[in-house]
Amino acid sequence: MLEVLRNLASIGNKWDYKTTEDQIENSGSNLRHERTHSGEKLSEWNAHFKCKVCGKDFAYPRLLRIHPKTHTGEKPYECKQCGKAFAMFHQLNRHGRTHTGEKPYECKQCGKAFARSGELHIHKRTHTGEKPYECKQCGKAFARSSHLQIHGRTHTGEKPYECKQCGKAFARSSYLQIHGRTHTREKPFGCQQCGKTFTSSRHLRIHGRMHTGEKPYECVQCGKAFTAASYLQIHKRTHTGERPYECKRCGKAFTQASHLHSHEQTHTGEKPYVCKKCGKAFARSDVLYKHERTHSGEKPYVCKQCGKAFASSSEHQIHGRVHTGEKPYECKQCGKAFARSGDLHRHERTHSGEKPYVCKQCGKSFATSRQLHKHGRTHTGEKPYECKQCGKAFAASYYLKSHERTHTGEKPYECQQCGKAFAMSRQLNRHGRTHTGEKPYECKQCGKAFARSGDLHTHGRTHTGDKPYVCKQCGKAFATSRQLHAHGRTHTGEKPYECKQCGKAFAMSHQLNRHGRTHTGEKPYKCKQCGKAFTRSPYLHSHEQTHTGEKP
């Protein structure tokens, strides 16, 4: 057939050179395609055209003429609009459509148009479901050969695209391109509804569903719907318990690759993302973005039910469960359920006793990185969270938040059994144990049980004699930071807790609480044997010894 085409061209047939070349190229494409079915190799088609530089064989002379440009880097075809150059004329033609917007290839089924015929051909498979490219290792099939090639890297671990700034490697060039924006802070994709910008078009598309409410990806097991397929995939692991991402150093497994990556930095201590305002460094870019909102005060995510605003979408989503009561994360050991996966993960350590986060200064270990980070401030004295009303500073943001309620009087957490209200959910949880009598934290040395993990930890020091908190003024040492903080007021004379009924002031909040009972007559500590009630737990404890005969 090729010989006929050439003869026709040579005798001045009406076909011009370009058409002849197109016919040759198209016939070549057809022949190459036929080999995907027959499995025949290039040598079986008598390939007589060989590259002298690399030895590659070609079936057609035109392809051999074009190939050397891959060695020389020659790109003779230049776009007059933007100056971009190409090795082949048809590449320039295709590129021209990015300027004109021309999409001559239209799908007859849905009307979607494409700039390239190959893109249309691949698109048609979304209608037919055809996936001709199958992975030989796991059997997964793909509509595109490029997708199969990228998938293959999940088996080989190959990550050929490396960031020149931080050395992080990626399996796909597009991932590297998106990652590069974490360094440049470029966010070229903007939401037309709220103005929020994103590093990738996919993130913008997912964000758009927050405005429309669209959640096209539904879990078959529980019916929960999601805005992105990746969110559904991660959610499915809450049903299967699958944790496919394992740390090579300690064997810990995770449901998400990003969680593994963050965990790995606990081993290396790497924190490549630095806040330009305060210099604080973070292991993850998204945590840095959230942190930056503590400076700007931006809270773009607003609850439609109560109007409360949040700095991150995840906080907004978790807050929604306060209204719905949803607690999708359940402990397999005790059945306790949680609204957040992180809370469940931390709770599981109460069973295992695991405390993987160790303070390098004093050797104290913690169940969570947040606790370690907070503890670090007891050494540095850092208190970055300051009350705008009175100037008081705190080591943790939630301490500031709780403190602010002393100004507003807000107590949003109410006990359903007795109606008592609290400024913090943690306080309500603890209070609940006064009704149930639950004391889940038991000392392994003496068997004494406690309602709070902090109380158990403090109690442990009665065995060790450890008093790590030392007063800088007088040198007196204490078992808890709270005791040191309260002691400090003996030097300053500060009494920040004032009774609203009589004006009497106290150095500690629990002293004010205790005093308040002299006005209300409340006696919350009741003896289970005789029913006698007391204003303070030590009085009850002493009274109980009259029943047991125990001598204090």
Image (spheres, helix red, strand yellow):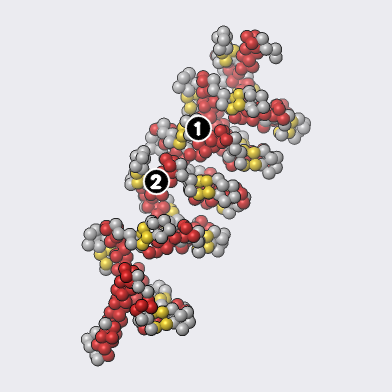
Q: Residue at x 56, y 47 (%)?
A: 251
The answer to whether residue 223 is above or below residue 476 is below
Image coordinates for residue 316, horizontal then vertical, percent: 44, 40
Looking at the rendered structure, the kind of residue marked 2 is: Leu
Indicate which disc residue 219 carries.
none
SS at badge 2: helix
Looking at the rendered structure, the kind of residue marked 1 is: Gln
Image coordinates for residue 119, horizontal then vertical, percent: 32, 65
Q: Is residue 435 visible?
A: yes
Image coordinates for residue 368, horizontal then vertical, percent: 58, 39
Q: Which residue is mark 1?
A: 333
Q: Residue at x 27, y 57 (%)?
A: 127
Q: Earlier in the sequence, mark 2 or mark 1?
A: 2
Report the Cα–Cα distance between label 2 and label 1.
25 Å
Q: Residue at x 28, y 61 (%)?
A: 124
| Disc 2 residue crowd, few under 14, some 14–19, many 20+, Cα 10 Å | some
- Given residues 385 and 288, the one toward you in this image is 288
- Given residues 511 and 326, the one toward you in this image is 326
- Given residues 149 and 14, the one toward you in this image is 149
Image coordinates for residue 102, horizontal then vertical, percent: 29, 68
Q: Which residue is mark 2?
A: 232
Q: Quadrant of residue 29?
A: bottom left
